[in-house]
Amino acid sequence: MIAVTRRVFSVASLAGVAAVAFPAVLRGQAKPRLVVIGGGPAGATVAKYVAKDSNGAIDVTLVEPLAKFVTCFHSNLYLGDFRSWDSIAHDYKLDAYGVKHVRQAASAIDRDKKQVRLADGSTLDYDRLVVAPGIDLAFDSVPGWSEEAAEVMPHAWKPGPQTQLLKTRLDALQDGATIVMVAPPNPYRCPPGPYERVSCMAAVLKKKGHSKSRIVVVDPKDRFSKMALFQEGWQAHYPGMVEWMDPKMHGGLKSVDPKTGTVVTDLETIKADLVNVIPKQMAGKIARDAGLANGTGYCPIDPATMKSAQDPNIFVLGDAAIAGAMPKSAFSANSQAKVVALAVRGELTGSRVFPARYANTCWSVIAADDTVKIGGRYEPKDGAIAEVEGFVSKTGEDKDVRRQTSEENMGWYKGIVADIFA
């Protein structure tokens, strides 16, 4: 790391802070430059808050090829007919805060030159870089499956056309159909997500009057997030429709065959009318190619700032980061982004930085007016982000409690997308 000389001057507007330090490397430069790769809940939030709260003192560029972002969170509700497609698709309105939106993909990061190369070959210089590329799917992690096979056995774990494809296939099923979900190994985006998806698909089948259709979950894990709550809900709302299989029950997944629609385990071959493969996941390619990930495929960070463990000028957050006890969720990403925004402004303008505090809540819809949640508060501790307080819905809760949780879920969505994109 290059040592940076600092100079100090007083700023009266910061109560209790007598002096503020500015990096000497920024002297003579019109504005310090922040480049943000990825316009999801993590990246878009950082870009917005740095631009807004620095009052134009930092040049902020968001690198995101999409003009409209479809949220992965609540996409299950679209599958289950609880939300419309338009309600989960959002325009970026960050230019109101001075954010420059470059609608290209980032193709490479040159950490020595502190440059981001874009798809058209042009480059962006940065003083600080935020990398929030989300996840990539390991298409080779399920034998017989591939990126091409996903057009037949959709994953729908990245929002957009895949989500619409899974919805079309689900709505076309006739009574007596078999759906097989291949669930992902840990760690992955949205731990309760696959099981909320099962619930939402079951809701569609029930609404259509299916009495013979079934959903089989072939899971590499022996337990999952909110397991007791989901299993209670499946029994209450969809009795006999959902069969969850852990490795002891299926013996291990051997392969899938898109041509025949079969899923082969050590113990049986299941002929399916619809197969939803959710594979192993890892940090987005741009982060891995830049050497920001370790052997897990995800990126280690400083828990106090979300700064990359590999580069002091780069922050990694959201699904791509190894965030200790925090799950990979939109709420987590948005919470981490606000810590990063403070840290970036502190480093580039000398503004006050407060100790990192993180939060998360994950809501899961089981049926109409039956929603459960899990969450907690987190702080840096012993080199990791640790949970300091947690909560989870209880089995056997009153219907009014679940209804209130459903309303809370919808209210949270409305609030967070406004916080991220508006």
Image: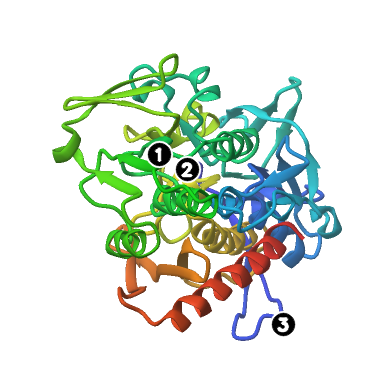
Mark 2: which secondary structure? helix
Q: CA distance from mark 3 to mark 2?
A: 39 Å
Point 35% across, 65% down: residue = 236
Given the image, on which type of amino acid does mark 3 rest? Ala
Q: Secondary structure at mark 1?
A: loop
Image position of 414 with respect to 309: above or below: below
Q: Are marks 1 and 2 in contact (CB under 8 Å)?
A: yes
For badge 1, the amino acid type reads Tyr
- 226 on left or right of 118: left
Q: Which residue is mark 2?
A: 320
Quick one: label 3 or label 2, which is nearer the N terminus?
A: 3
* Residue occupied by mark 1: 298
- Mark 3 lies on residue: 12
- Can residue 317 be seen in the rendering of this structure? no
Q: Nearer the viewer, residue 29 or 61?
A: 61
Q: Earlier in the sequence, mark 1 or mark 2?
A: 1
